[in-house]
Amino acid sequence: PLPASLPRETRVIRPEEECCPACGGELRILGNYVSEQLELISSAFKVIETQRPQLACCRCDHIVQAPEPSKSIARSYAGAGLLAHIVTRKYADHLPLYRQSEIYRRQGVELSRATLRRWTGAVAELLEPLYGVLRQYVLMPGKVHADDIPVLVRDPGSGKPRSARLWVYVRDDRNAGSQMPPAVWFAYSPDRKGIHPQNHLAGYSGVLQASAYGGYLALYESGRITEAACMAHARRKIHDVHAKAPTDITTEALQRIGELYAIEAEVRGCSAEQRLAARKARAAPQMQSLYDWIQTQMKTLSRQPDTAKAFAYLLKQWDALNVYCGNGWVEIDNNIAESALRDVAAGRKKWLFAGSDSGGEHAAVLYTLIGTCRLNNVEPEKWLRYVIEHIQDWPANRVRDLLPWKVDLTETSFR
């Protein structure tokens, strides 16, 4: 069945006959056959003309006029709906600005790529207050997932693309039964130096679930942040060896790790206390058995260096891999952060590179907002339109009320 939330247009097709064609008798309603067809209404441009009459007093010539409504972007004719559409098409649907420009031209409106780029940056700057609020929310004490991905940025000097970085931090405890809304926060940096995540997490305390990237190591020295590793990374290294040359050893290793994941599947969505109890009773003994078994295999793996290397990686991360067995909030892997990067990975294949460092910073803002919408099953274009339309006049001390999970879009209608 088609969603009940969709608007419906009812068409009634009545028989041409007004009386029975067989005997001429009066016709009565016997039943009603209903069928549904899903149709798409194409987007179309329209111009909203705002008129503000000037009125003068007939006695004293005092002039009155309604104030000009706030504009989403100063000195711009772009409406909130158009801006939300442009941003969503690029950062959620991965449609580059030059392609959008071509589509709008076919619809009879000339919007250059430079204009679209300028508007996109202006939207990112307009929504920076929400970006800051989401940073505070994601990096509250507790547990956060982190990862990073390379992005190409045009060098201002040579004009050639160079490798920069987008870092992602995710708060999502739904697997442990939490009712707190999930959220994501992206940060841009011109390189991959460890100082960047160290600055991002300067005020954070709790568990950091991340890859084995060396730039994170300084964060663990004070004990303020606990390292939790990713079993998916360790498994992937074994799986890569197995895919090239499967052996009984790699087969058993993957089977043992699979049993750990089976336990996680059973307790997904349970409370942190229930997950911890199940892990202590079942996962912790299996982890110890896996450790002992790998140590035994390492003694005979001199002729299989690739397998030994994969096992050595797992053993090096062993303490951090075991953190989840003693904390019901921690996950067995870092797939939550890796999933948050899929939009960036898909998008960079289409738009290839950011135009500048400021473009990378704008991308971080917009990926943050759209990623958080998606985590909360909020339609990003509709939410963006509402926020762009209202944030100029919104009280600064109530900006949290514009977060994706707080705005009620069910009753919202647009012109």
Image (cartoon, rainbow, N blue to C red):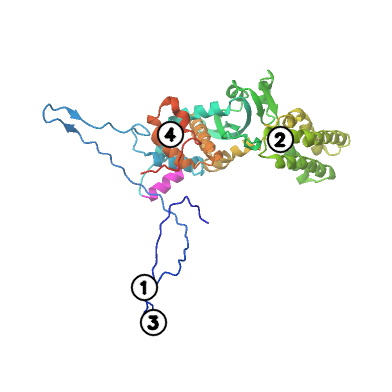
- How far, Cα to Cα, is label 4 from label 2? 42 Å
Residue 392 falls in which quadrant of the image? top left
Q: Residue furthest top?
A: 222
* CA distance for labels 3 and 4: 70 Å
Q: Where does residue 203 sit, x and y in percent of width and height?
A: 59, 20
Q: Secondary structure at mark 2?
A: helix
- Pick whichever of labels 4 and 1 is earlier in the sequence: 1
**For the residues bearing labels 1 and 2, Cβ distance under 8 angstroms:** no
Q: Confirm whether residue 160 shows in the render.
A: no
User: Is residue 395 visible to the viewer in this orientation of the structure?
Assistant: yes
Is residue 85 depicted above or below 220 in this figure?
Answer: below
Q: Secondary structure at mark 3?
A: loop
Report the Cα–Cα distance between label 3 and label 1.
16 Å
Of the residues shown, which amino acid type is indicated by label 2? Arg
Magenta-drawn segment:
97-107
Q: Report the Cα–Cα distance between label 1 and label 2.
A: 66 Å
Q: Secondary structure at mark 1?
A: loop
Residue carrying label 2 = 275
Residue found at the far bottom of this picture: 23
Cα separation, mark 3 vs mark 2, equals 74 Å
